[in-house]
Amino acid sequence: MSYQEEYVGSFPKDFSYGPFEQNGESDNGSLQEDHKPRILLMGLRRSGKSSIQKVVFHKMSPNETLFLESTNKIVKDDINNSSFVQFQIWDFPGQIDFFDPTFDSDTIFGGCGALVFVIDAQDDYQDALDKLQLTVTKAYRVNSNIKFEVFIHKVDGLNDDYKMESQRDIHHRATEDLAEAGLDHVHLSFHLTSIYDHSIFEAFSKVVQKLIPQLPTLENLLNILISNSGIEKAFLFDVVSKIYIATDSSPVDMQSYELCCDMIDVVIDISCIYGMVDETEMNTFNSQSSSLIKLNNGTVLYLREVNKFLALVCILREENFQKQGVIDYNFLCFRDAITQVFELRSKSQNANKNRSDIELLTNGAGDSTEGTSDSLQVPLP
Ligand SMILES: Nc1nc2c(ncn2[C@@H]2O[C@H](COP(=O)(O)OP(=O)(O)OP(=O)(O)O)[C@@H](O)[C@H]2O)c(=O)[nH]1
């Protein structure tokens, strides 16, 4: 995956929340690049925002985050190219001040798809809750379509009872605060997370899924696949980030998800060491990629490449795998259907683009930030 990291503000001397002005790039050209949907990471200082971004999208090991310096600028991170999911993550400094005149809320919240607010569960969280209320109020006024996600973070240090108790308490107080501000209709989603296990990947998967307009179709296709193939659980993974972009509608249990993530790691590692390198793409995960792991409890993990970004990972009973021919045939139908879904999406995106180009030609230069999509852009498989 190619990541592009860009600093778009600095603090305190030349701090500016208006990223385009900060870079001196207020022309439409630079704004157009920012049409990708945005996920904002906010929360108090040292709550773990940068660590989350580094661990999920930059393969940083959790221990290394101990040495991360405090963020004093808005850091804009482009997640694109070799990944299926394409968006920007903006990591905000903890000491963000919404009342600073240079804080351009319209630009920042306008094109935002999801706002992830990180709360350090190992710390006293009253201040964090106050900030959450302020942030949601500000953001909702600008853009009522934002999905608000609260990460109750660093729960690795808490025992199970305390974890549940904190979640209940934070949930209760945060919704009460919003009701006080007259925003009781705003929905907050809560996730217990830690960078030291898979919970952070799982939570981010759920955030990203909400930005994929085709999610119900993907879920439906997975339901059809599993019910006709004797599969117990199936995940559609973005291979590079290990985010699952869809799963069938049966509940996800953490252990299954972890097993599937580990399988992807094994396949990628083996492919990198022994795989044939495609000279044009340098990509060892390709249409030939598949893997089968039999566990000693009678369960089989089966991975098939869907396209260069996506893999299907299934969990099934060993006896059901005897009909591998049926599974493989159904998989091919599934893969065709997925390709069609995204071809359709790509066609409608192109049509929209052509339409807005024509509008621009007839209306003269319009504001290119208008109509910014807050749903994920997906490259053609
Ligand atoms: N135990 C534990 N520590 C974490 C976790 N996530 C982050 N940390 C630690 O929290 C500290 C602060 O993390 P950062 O990512 O720098 O926090 P930040 O929110 O970006 O901080 P600012 O840049 O100051 O706003 C680091 O020492 C991390 O190692 C977690 O899940 N569990």
Image: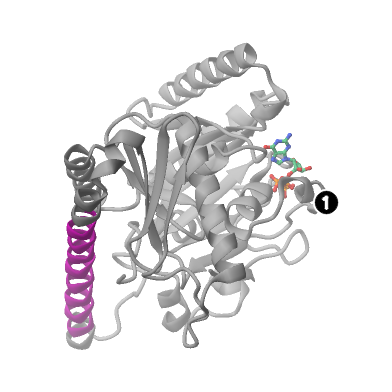
**Magenta region, residue range:** 331-358
Instruction: Name the image quarter holding residue 342.
Output: bottom left
Q: Is mark 1 within 8 Å of ligand 1?
A: yes
Q: Say which amino acid is labelled 1.
A: Phe
Residue 317 visible in the shown view: no
Closest to the observer, 356 or 13? 356
Disc 1 target residue: 67
Main secondary structure along the magenta-highlighted residues: helix
Instruction: Please say if 80 is above or below 296.
Output: below
Instruction: Name the image quarter holding residue 60.
Output: bottom right
Is 220 placed left or right of 194 in the picture?
Answer: left
Instruction: Please say if 375 is above or below 308.
Output: above
The picture places residue 203, in percent across and down from the top left corner, at 49, 39
Is 164 placed left or right of 36 in the picture?
Answer: right
Label 1 element class: helix
x 59%, y 28%: residue: 129
